[in-house]
Image: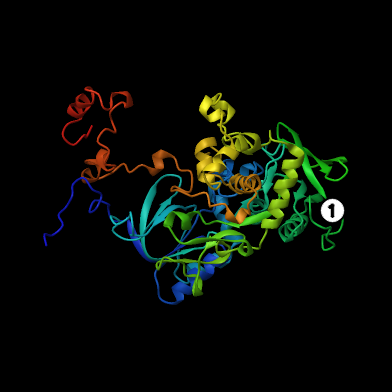
Amino acid sequence: MTARGFDPKAQAGKVPAPSRRVEVLVIGAGPAGIAASLEARRGGAEVLLVDENPVSAGLMGLDVPLYYGGRQTAAVQAGTRMIEQVFAARPALAEAFEAGVEIELGVSCWGAWVPGLGLASLPEPLAGLADEDRAWMVGFDRLILATGARDVVFGFPGWDQPGVMGAAALAALLETYDAFAGRRLAILGMGDLAVATARLARDRGLQVVALIDPAAEPRTDLPPGVEVLAGWAPFLAAGGADGVESLTVRELVTGAERVLTCDTVVQAIALTPAIDLLDVLGAALVMDPARGGHVPVIADGGATSLPQVFVAGDVAGVADTLAAQQAWIRALAAQNGGRVVLCQCEAVTREALLAVRQPDYLGPPSPGMAARDLGAVLQDGPANPDQIKRLTRAGMGPCQGRRCREQVALTLAGAANTPVSAIPLAGYRAPVRPLPLSVLADWDEARIMGGHWDVWFGIKGQWTPYDDIGTEREALYDNLLGGDMHL
């Protein structure tokens, strides 16, 4: 048998080695990530612990990784102070450092890959890391993801202004950064997350005017003085130059309205595991309502379907909140109509989503697109959020679907009259954090990597104008490009 030779037009053998490698790479320096780092270090492994906190003010402005809602103070722009705040809020970091764990803060993991189908050219398992100035690759023997959970949020009139935020983001601004700008809160939700949020706010000297929920029964385990509005839903968040100033709520049965004076509306309805890196890695995922939605398939010790990858903490699952989420989407759709924006980044309304229509800023749809709606799409097969994203742009913005993917899935499930557990996961792609091209670019790319890059897709006419394909002009472009079509 002839030995397989080097193909100059393929990636195999060209992917550079990472800038460094470690035995154990841990992503996420919350309680679970720190505990996993300490355990690995005590076992004698070399451990690198990476955490994106302190998150830059720019990412906070994009509501990444949490739904900060513009309620962070200017203190988040002081980098040194923010690092000090993270260490003060997480004293176990000092213990990990003393134990010999290498710690990098303010560094995000924007992708991770292991060699396999379609990735045979990788020299070893790799993780892409980045700070505000550069991006680099780290190789690893074992990867532990302790990425936690993020906010699940829903659209209603006025939710696209500063002052509407998520419960996890509020906890981060209060407990980690001490940089919350609000004083008077209305909290959406009445489950354990909402109650914990109300207690945290009260403990920090904030005023909680009410807990609002369209379906839940009133609870009695709330801090004293907190009003409970069960059977009510938000109707309008009104505000001024600094964002929210009041929240109008409406009783679902009677239609009665009340105006609550507040500067912040906290969505404490649900959390969902932050599985973006697991999806990029290709780890097996499953929809498990008992664990809060799409979660990794795991075995003992947090092992995933990939032998090099493990999980720890809330990324493995959170409390079941799907019933509460469905109640919220039904209530908001019933009283707020179709003009409510679901995807803030791309201004996609509920009406446009159901009509499978591009956002208004792109102009009117073509006659062919205008003739189709979700009902017509469903005749071709099951509802798929990735297909809907391509047709409507819902989820294509810089927040990468963090504000809309759950409500899009729930809306599709309602329209298709199917359980939300039957709606596929909207796929994640690297980079899972929005990065400037100046950071992501490989300015020192090797010459061998740059050669023949334009034929990796195997499309001979990829540089030929569409109208010239199949005509006598097609040969002109082949000649201009040369034998290997390299520009």
Which residue is at a point 32% across and 55% down the rendered structure image?
Answer: 119
Q: x%, y% of residue 336?
A: 74, 38
Question: On the rendered image, what quadrant is the C terminus found in?
Answer: top left
Which residue is at a point 41% across and 65% down the rendered structure image?
Answer: 306
Q: Is residue 398 visible?
A: no
Q: Residue furthest left?
A: 2
Q: Nearer the viewer, residue 271 or 69?
A: 271
472 above or below 191?
Answer: above
Q: Amino acid at mark 1?
A: Val
Quarter assignment of residue 218: bottom right
- Label 1 belongs to which residue? 228
Circle 1: is it few (<14), some (14-19), or many (20+) Cα within 10 Å? many
Q: Residue furthest front?
A: 379
How many badges with numbers are in the image?
Answer: 1
Q: x%, y% of residue 33?
A: 52, 65
169 above or below 487?
Answer: below
Colouring chosen for the image of the structure = rainbow
Q: Name the side, left or right, on which 328 lies relative to 391.
A: right
Q: x%, y% of residue 37?
A: 48, 69
Q: Is residue 259 visible?
A: yes
Element assignment for label 1:
strand
Q: Name the side, left or right, on which 395 lies relative to 320.
A: left
447 above or below 193?
Answer: above
Q: Nearer the viewer, residue 305 or 44?
A: 305
Q: x%, y% of residue 456?
A: 27, 43
Q: Residue furthest bottom?
A: 43
Question: On the rendered image, what quadrant is the N terminus found in?
Answer: bottom left
Q: Name the side, left or right, on which 416 lies relative to 213.
A: left
382 above or below 460?
Answer: below
